[in-house]
Image: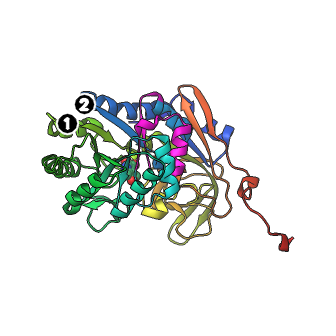
Amino acid sequence: MHFFKYRADELYAEEVPVKKLAEKYGTPLYVYSYNTLLRHFKAYTDAFNGHPHIICFAIKSNSNTAILRLFAKNGGGADIVSGGELYVALKAGMKPEKIVYAGVGKTEDEIRFALRSKILMFNVESEDELRGIDRVAGRIKRRAPVALRINPDIDPETHPYIATGLRRHKFGIPIEEALEYYRLASKLKNINVIGIHTHIGSQITRVSPFVDALKRILLLIDKLSIQGVKIDYLDVGGGLGISYRDEEPPVPKDLARNLIPLLNGRKLTLIMEPGRSIAGNAGILVTKTLYLKKAEEKEFIIVDAGMNDLIRPSLYGAYHHLLPVVRKKRDTVLCDVVGPICESSDFLATERELSRVKQGEYLAVMGAGAYGFSMSSNYNSRPRAAEVLVKGRGHFLIRKRETFSDLIRKEKIPAFLK
Ligand SMILES: *Cc1c(COP(=O)(O)O)cnc(C)c1O
């Protein structure tokens, strides 16, 4: 459920016509709905209310500090995957004791920064990393709180690029080797084993992969307990899907109904790392039609948002609904909606039946709130888009549009070329 709806034939973000935002702030433009973000966040906290838990928003899905502040103010934490994300999380006001840190390639500098910041725990993905964290912690006389990321070998039945929990993936530790790893971790002087972590993939549209993964992890926790390893934090990752097209994914309440009974009688604090299911449908990308071009078999609608603004269609073949910002009664046309970037893979939609649009009219790319702006780039020397947060009748610029001078701000011409 989100708050981007037509009133008569105009698309609104909460109480504000999207066209008004496009005219005021320019395009391409990311527009987020405050009340949708809050509602999606609260769907998690309400569903898991009866059980000790922390909702650690996956910052890689949307790292705007205004949006992170919204979650922080409502008791949320962060799932981070880099030193940069830790910096952003802290700047946004996230409490370090609600920050968990995953990723297969943490550097020494990043580990030191996280230790000094006193984050809740490192989700460790390999033996080398475990020893590396132990070493850095020893050097600065800290004990590193650690969970091991276990790969439960569950098929999440999602796109191969966003599945992470199978044996062949680079993520985590194979579940068969988990006991050995925990034994090693317990022996390391500067490591404090407190948790277990798993994250099986993204855009998962059924409950059963989560249940299967949790069952495997709980068996492992029992084995660990026999060996004297006590687990306090059970981090089940993120990955709940959203409706991009016609999917009907479970909601947090469905997850809670299936997962909480399995946790009865256990003293485990549950951690969840949702990204897409909170931010995805809470944001749209607004783009303007530049040109129309007729080819033999279809038409091209050329818009001012490209793959540098939203890469999901190009990268994953992802589907996003495209809606006219002002609906007209016109016939439909089979078309590709493409951006201005010099790549054939620069499209927002292919072979799409859309109501005809005219030059200068706006389209809304729905479901762009997660892995939209955060994956955007300056490719083709395009300044990145502006971001606006809408709350009721209010609208607030939360990231200025980049300028041309931003494009070369960090560059230097060596003296011998001057
Ligand atoms: C990407 C990621 C998430 C968030 O996934 P969503 O599908 O956006 O919910 C959570 N945890 C980890 C470790 C991740 O890599």
Q: Which mark is residue 260?
A: 1
Mark 2 lies on residue: 51
Between the residue at mark 1 and the residue at mark 2, the CA separation in whole angstroms equals: 7 Å
Q: Position of residue 204 (x, y in %)?
A: 30, 51
Q: Is residue 3 visible?
A: no
Residue drawn at the location 47% of the way across and 60% of the way down:
313
Mark 1 vs mark 2: which is more N-terminal? 2
Q: Position of residue 402 (x, y in %)?
A: 69, 49
Q: Position of residue 81 (x, y in %)?
A: 45, 52
- Up the image or down, 56 lies above or below 15; here it is below
SS type, badge 2: loop
- Residue 84 among those drawn in magenta: yes
Q: Residue furthest right?
A: 418
Q: Is mark 2 within 8 Å of ligand 1?
A: no
- Color encoding of the figure: rainbow
Magenta stretch in the rendered image: 73-101
Categorize mark 1 by other alpha carbons within 10 Å: few (<14), some (14-19), many (20+): some
CB-based contact (under 8 Å), mark 1 and mark 2: yes
SS type, badge 1: helix
